[in-house]
Image: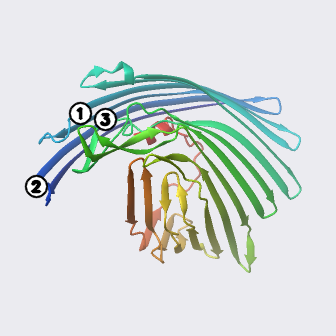
Amino acid sequence: ASSIDFNADYTSRKQQSTNQQQELSTEYEDRDVNTESQTRSKLFAEKLFVTHPLWKGQIEIGEEYTNTRWKSRFDNQEGYIANSNNEQHESNIAPFMELRQHLGSFQLSAGLRYEHVESEYFVDGFRRDEQCRIYNDLFPSVSVSTSAKDLQFSFSYAKRTTRPSYWQLSSDVIYENRLNRQTGNPYLKPIKYHNMNATIMWKWLYLMTNYSHCVDPILYTANSLEEDSKVNFVTYKNYDHADWLTITLGVQKNVKLGQATWTPQYNVMLMKPWFKSEFLGEEKSFNHPIFALQLGNIISLPHEWLLQADFNMHTHGYQQNAWFDCTNPMLSLSVSKDFFKRRLNVKLTGNDLFNGGINRFTLYSNRLMISKEEDNDSRCIQLSLRYRINVTPSKYKGTGAGNAEKNRL
């Protein structure tokens, strides 16, 4: 039978922040710096698609539309930083189609999405033609999967895009101190990904491989301020390309232990990047791989009791243009129980018991090397109570519209 699905979303948001800094220096004059910023955004999105049986499967045809308005103001009353008043308008219309078929032991799908995007940029109420953009792109996707006895195999390819967030496109300035400032880049291009995935599963053992070729990746870059070479001006830049290979070897199995069920899911991962950028006038490679270990355990007990134990850690290595000098061993334990026919859930959790959620990394960016340590303060005890008002499964759950655009805001 055919089905029609329609979703519509509208969001409106306003954010305002003020920052007061008192700078004391032995080499420069002492000074106060006061900044104020405000952003407003409005988004309307709708998505309509029709699913209809076709031959040995079904076809899905639809369209998605988003319309966004984003405004930002930045003021510095002392005049150390230029004030700004920006506005961005963007509309995106995207028809799409996907065909899914079952042919013997094979499941096939092929899809195509076309996106027409118009983006306008305004400064102090005047349209900046050189910063306005029109994009027309096709995004194909294909997948095939099959199974024979205990063996399963799947392969997929998809072209995707991620557009810069509105903050990344803004000319507003974040003032850190007299030697470091950060801003966006209105000339950024969208990132395009070519993703290939292959999975082989035999009984409870699986091997997953993902290769991603990224065109125009967006990363930080640091330059000197034109009027003062001592000041670092950090912004965003499109680099040529970057590649990632991720290989995961894992096991997942249900083990009966009397009346209890133990479900372990253990993964060993290799994440290998290929990326180059400039640092201190020379080309630098960021190719060192990272190995990761993930150990997940769930034990289901009678009378609606549930135990969980999770452990994660990784080796040193590069993530894009940052070297992570930490392993982040993180152990979390939890126990939960359902009451009143699963309406009430009580859960006690001990998060990051080893206090491993501390990141130490060094960012290499053009003329700047930043070493930083972040303590996420993730070790804690949590007690949560959840009450389900309606435990009956809903007949319809909307998928939402404009989800990617919401993330950009």
In the depicted structure, whether residue 369 falls above or below residue 351: above
Residue 227: x and y in percent read 23, 38
Q: In terms of image quadrants, where is residue 259?
A: bottom right
- The quadrant of the image that shows the C terminus is top left
Are circles 1 and 3 on residues that touch, CB within 8 Å? yes
Q: Which residue is mark 2?
A: 30
Q: Which residue is mark 3?
A: 171
Say which amino acid is labelled 1. Answer: Ser
Numbered circle sitting on residue 342: none
Instruction: Look at the image and tell me whether residue 2 can be seen.
Output: no
Q: Nearer the viewer, mark 3 or mark 2?
A: 2
The answer to whether 202 appears left or right of 263 in the picture is right
Give the mark, 3 or 2, whose residue is nearer the N terminus: 2
- Seen from the viewer's position, the closer of residues 203 and 178 is 178
Q: Residue furthest bottom?
A: 258
Give the mark, 2 or 1, whose residue is nearer the N terminus: 2
Instruction: Look at the image and tell me whether residue 255 can be seen.
Output: yes
Residue 287: x and y in percent read 59, 54
Residue 95: x and y in percent read 59, 24
Task: Estimate the spatial distance between the alpha carbons at disc 2 and disc 1, rounded to whole Å.
Answer: 25 Å
- Seen from the viewer's position, the closer of residues 135 and 93 is 135
Assign a secondary structure to mark 1.
Answer: strand
Give the mark, 1 or 3, whose residue is nearer the N terminus: 1
- Seen from the viewer's position, the closer of residues 305 and 219 is 219
Task: Estimate the spatial distance between the alpha carbons at disc 3 and disc 2, rounded to whole Å.
Answer: 27 Å
Image point (83%, 33%), residue name? 56
Q: Which residue is mark 1?
A: 84
Image point (73%, 66%), residue name? 251
- Seen from the viewer's position, the closer of residues 285 and 83 is 285
Crowding at label 1, few (<14), some or many (≥20) Cα neighbours within 10 Å?
Answer: some
The answer to whether 359 appears left or right of 223 in the picture is right
